[in-house]
Amino acid sequence: MASEKRILVVAGDISGDVHAANLISAIKTLAPEIKIDTIGGLRMKALSDNYLYDLITKGAAGFDAVIKKFPTWLNLYKLVKNYLKGTKPSAVITVDFYGFNHQILKLAEAENIPAYYYVCPQVWASRRYRAKEIVRLTRKQFVIFPFEADIYKEYGGNPVFFGNPLLDTVPEPFEISYKKGKDAAWNFGLMVGSRPAEIEKHSKIFFDVFKEIKKVYKNAKCFMFAVPEVTDEKLYQLTGASKEEMQIVREKDFKIRRTMDFVLTCSGTATLENALLGLPMSVVYKTSFITYAIVRMIIKVRFISLVNILSNKEVVREFIQQDVNPEAISKEILGILGDETKYLNMRKTMLELRNKLGAPPVAKQSAQVILEDLCKTN
């Protein structure tokens, strides 16, 4: 490695920002002399020696959004190209977010810079062929589900599976008991997503669902779990809720989320977090017509929530696109809250997933492998 060792870490969405930050923290603990340059979000920025770009806030998700933000992507591409040529970091680590990170990896290849993929994209869900390109461009592929390793081995890769990195951050679940009767004070969580488009589309619908629940369970309490990138004012504006009706929660330790009795959640990483906490839930997702039409053509799995995908059955109900309406969703949820057996069975099934996802510390073990491999390279 060069006299001053530097690593570039790139993540493009909030879940990737969280995982990347944990990996950066592990690298700095194991090798404090290494400088970390980043493109990502607020969590990575807090740990960076050189923060190059806020990709989380200024990036885009969805096929139509990417087209609209093409000039942004082009400028960022040029920034990274110049950085790699001028700085020559010892390694590049990309985190999920294949569309942009694939371009980063090709730039690293052109400069003969070793690259690693941490939290490999879910090629098993769609576009499996991407695994071949990831193998070609990276020295090691860190996968987050055990079955993914076989895909990368098929293409001659070097997959590594220590476990799902959520195990580093999601605590053991609380023991909860079923709350009987219409006077039950259910703690009802809303997780509308982390991307601006998700927040815009889901917030009012999710709160409207809670209002339907509140008609039956008068003592129910509403908690909206928000990411730092959106303000309280924006969420109250979108939902039409008052501070008395809905408490906004911002936390890193799951302290409040662990106390939820039921969660209405956008699809994505949050569904697996909830499962690891044993929180009964329903999953909702609504996106633009263009994005949904394209996804329908390329997706290769029956479900959108990781809980159902990993269980290979419908453990939690999914409401997608035209099925997203407060009346139907609240009817499903009231059916679960009113049935002790159904409620507790959902919790039990989700908790069984925890034992299938490896063992912590995932980030530390992954950092160790990367550092050891770089020592061999240099």
Image (spheres, rainbow, N blue to C red):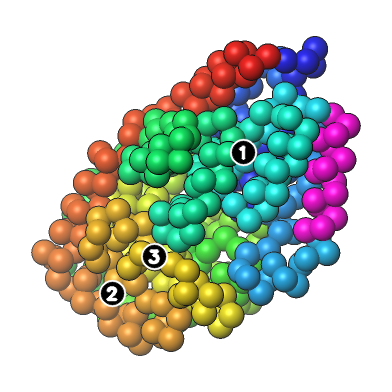
Looking at the rendered structure, the secondary structure element under dot 3 is loop
Give residue 1's position: percent from left, percent from top.
72, 15
Query: What amino acid is found at the position of numbered circle 1 in the picture?
Result: Leu
Q: Viewer-nearest of labels 3 and 1?
A: 1
Give residue 346's position: percent from left, percent from top.
21, 60
Q: Return the mark for residue 137.
A: 1
Q: Does the CB distance between marks 1 and 2 fall below 8 Å?
A: no
Which quadrant of the figure contains the C terminus?
Answer: top right
Looking at the rendered structure, the secondary structure element under dot 2 is helix
| 317 within the magenta span | no
Q: Does the CB distance between marks 3 and 2 fall below 8 Å?
A: no
Find the distance from the CA under tag 3 to the CA under tag 1.
Answer: 24 Å
Looking at the image, residue 310 sits to the left or right of residue 233; the answer is left
Looking at the image, residue 26 sits to the left or right of residue 125; the answer is right
Badge 1 or badge 2: first in the primary sequence? 1
Q: Which residues are magenta?
A: 73-87
Give residue 107's position: percent from left, percent from top.
75, 41
Q: Observer-nearest residue: 353 or 281?
A: 353
Residue 280 location, quadrant: bottom left
Q: Viewer-nearest of labels 1 and 2?
A: 1
Q: Identify the residue position indicated by label 2 in the image.
A: 333
Looking at the rendered structure, the secondary structure element under dot 1 is helix
